[in-house]
Structures are given as structure tokens and as C-alpha cells.
Image (cartoon, rainbow, N blue to C red):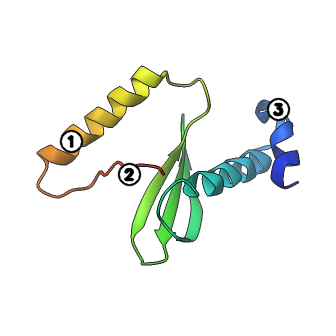
Amino acid sequence: MGGMSMLLKQFSNLSRRQKLARLRFIAQKAMDHYHIEVSDLRFYAEHSNALFSVVAADGRKYLLKVTRPGDHSYEETLAALEWLRFVNAAVQVHIIRVGPTR
């Protein structure tokens, strides 16, 4: 199952393998919105969000978080981004960086 046909089936009705394939497809599409050439994208973990390990062509490493629509309001997302910026500014070693999309 690939491309748009994969997106038509209700997510809750998918097998674990199909869910991971769909989340990976979404993660790949999401990376199109960043100025990062991806050389490797792998599933990392899932809890309430799916996390993907991303390696850029230049060797830099990222963690991409994919959330389900409706899990967080726009205001909650902005608050989380502000918190990440605060933590990033408060620590000596920068471990968290919020990247803008195009």
C-alpha cells in the first residue's frame, strides 16, 4: 500500500506495521517543508507522538515529532514551542532546537 491510497484507510483500522508505514510516509512529506536534505529517516519511538530519527546529507542529526491532527490545539503547540525555546536558551549545551518550515 503506498502513496495516497495508503492515506485513505482509517488510521485506527490499520495494523501496527501499516500505522508505522503511514507515519513514515507523513514524516517524509513533512521533511519537504524544511531546508534539510534527508539521507536517512527511521522510526525511533512512539507514545502519544511518533518520533523519527533523521540524518541530513551533511551528517547533522534531528528528531522529528509527528502528532495526530486534533491531539493538540494551536495554542498548546505554540506553548510547547515557546517552552522548547526557553529550555534551549537556559542551558549551556543546546540540545533542543525548533526548526522553522518553509
- Is there CB contact under 8 Å for labels 3 and 2? no
Residue lying farthest to the bottom in this orientation: 58
Q: Which residue is under mark 3?
A: 10
- Is there CB contact under 8 Å for labels 3 and 1? no
Identity, as a three-letter code, of the amino acid under mark 3: Gln
61 or 45, which is in the foreground? 61
Q: CA distance from mark 2 to mark 1?
A: 15 Å
**Residue at x 13% of width, y 49% of height:** 91
- Going from N to C along the chain, the mark reached first, 3 or 1, is 3
- Is there CB contact under 8 Å for labels 2 and 1? no
**Residue at x 42% of width, y 77% of height:** 59
Q: Which residue is under mark 1?
A: 87
Left or right: 28 in relation to 56: right
Of badges 3 and 2, nearer the viewer stands 2
Task: Say what secondary structure mark 2 lies in.
Answer: loop
Q: Which residue is under mark 2?
A: 99
Residue 65 versus residue 24 in the image, above or below: above
Residue lying farthest to the front in this orientation: 102
**Residue at x 49% of width, y 77% of height:** 57
Identity, as a three-letter code, of the amino acid under mark 2: Gly
Q: CA distance from mark 3 to mark 2?
A: 30 Å
